[in-house]
Image (cartoon, grey):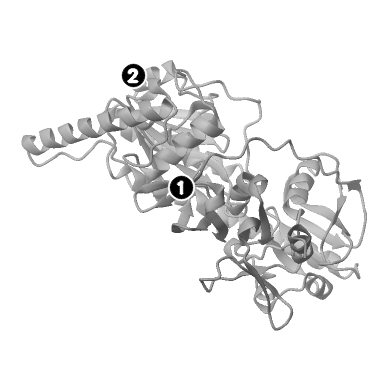
Amino acid sequence: MTLSVPPLAIAPSEPGSRGVAAKGSREAASSAKEVARAWESFAAGEDIEMGIRPEILASWYRCRDRYEVDRTLDVAPGARGNDVQRLDNGVIFTTLGGLGALAGQEVERDGAVVTVADGDGRVLGAWGDPSAQRRAELHNLAPWSSWSEECTGTNGMGTSLEVSGPVTVTGPEHWCEAFHRWSCAGISVRDVVTGSPVASINISRWNAALSELVPAWLSQAAACVEQEIYRRAIYEADKVISEFNRKCGQVAEPFMAMDRGGNVIAANDEAVSLLGLTPESSIAVGATEPAKRWTPDISGLPEVVRWAKERAQGPARWSGYACLPVSPGEDATPVTLRPVVDSNHVVGMLCLFGVQEGEPYEEHAEAAVGPLPRRIVGLRNDRLVLLAPSEIRYAEADRNIVWLNTERGRIQAATRGLDNIERSLVSCGFSRVHRRFLVNLRRVAELERGIKGELFLIMDPRSHDSIPVSRRQAPELRRLLGI
């Protein structure tokens, strides 16, 4: 694979005069002191809303309230486990390693270190200035150490795995005080099928700033690697569709094929009818491009697909089944999953409805619900908005971005993914009524029926907003509302 990434310059460009340089230096020092004061207040338990970049403050909340990272940590812990997280195509980490090595040669003169980590934040390789690497090793910024936010707090690698796009973490923006003299910039590489992070590339510099050009370079580096993931996703879809076509004539039951993320890429007429696909959804069935694939609205299916992928790594010709609420108002239907394997990797699933075959899926009881979250963090302009769950009427997903409809207006959630928001709010009386909508049941004001019997929720009688209810979710919603 050709690495079409431009040369990397990490040192800030030379200012036009010494006076400008001195002014910029004073402003940077002043800003660092303000961030340091905010960090001290926040680490002591206070809540702050202004003065810190929203993505950094959201990370601090995760580190303090969710992960409970020790802010006095000065050495990153060793990574857990012995197996490197792998994609189905090992070319990904080969490409990342090539980028890291090339960038390491370029940044050596600027006293910087380039690191590559897997999707769990485990460092796989480090390149750059030898003296900077020795200093980094004092903090265990070296292979086989863990730099996820959960383990090491706010940092370029770990925070990039939590959000999309390039992330810079400068000085006291790091959660752990021992790292306050480092400047870091990182970006995650994401699986185009599942949306989950699979790797990260990061640049770190001791006691010096990074160039404003670094985030653009990181974006191009990530895009270069994701091209290979995209190519692999198209290849996998062709394999799955080929296997589906080969088996389709042998079954009379509803039958469909899914990619690794549980998105449908092929279905027979019986499955289209059973799932009640709309014309728009029917068009998406058969799409090989990841962004155009259709996600079925079957409660519990994503968990079953993840379980099947894990189990299919073992015995040959594995199959398993689960009973899922496929049709609204009817008993759960047996759904059998058979993996599609290519080069010893699961690339998709064949899904047969009405058939029980292989290992049964046993749903494990959820862990006891912990204390309610103190705040849901939202982003508006340059401010971080702290919301009590009771303020939120509903959450709406726009792909991986989640919008919160609140009494303070429409606010973007700092956490990406409606599934993640649901996990935070399910104990607060929220319920998923549609694959795109999560509603606060306490805020439902009116119910409305459509021409064809569709159900809509009115959250605020003063507005014209109405929330569609999926046919599959309608029976459970009626039960929860007592109607």
Residue 453 lies, in percent from the top left, at 74, 78
Counting every numbered tag in the picture gives 2
Residue shown at 58% from the left, 65% from the top = 459
Place residue 275 in its image quadrant: bottom right
Residue 122 lies, in percent from the top left, at 55, 30
Can the viewer see residue 305 in this picture?
yes
**Disc 1 element:** helix
Most foreground residue, 374 or 436: 374
Place residue 38 in its image quadrant: top left
Residue 410's disc is none
Most foreground residue, 154 or 437: 437
Instruction: Classify 119 as above or below 232.
Output: above
Can the viewer see residue 149 in this picture?
no
Mark 2 touches mark 1? (CB < 8 Å): no
199 relative position to 58: left or right: right
Residue 471 lies, in percent from the top left, at 75, 69
Instruction: Classify 285 as above or below 335.
Output: below
Identify the mark nearer the N-term, 2 or 1: 2
**Disc 2 element:** helix
User: What's the residue type where badge 2 is placed?
Assistant: Ser
Residue shown at 51% from the left, 71% from the top = 463
User: What's the residue type where badge 1 is placed?
Assistant: Ala
Residue farthest along the bottom direction in this orientation: 451
The residues bearing labels 2 and 1 have C-alpha atoms spaced at a distance of 27 Å
107 relative position to 395: left or right: left
Residue shown at 60% from the left, 59% from the top = 443
Residue beneath disc 2: 131
Residue 202 lies, in percent from the top left, at 42, 36
Most foreground residue, 458 or 113: 458
Residue beneath disc 1: 222
Residue shown at 48% from the left, 58% from the top = 407
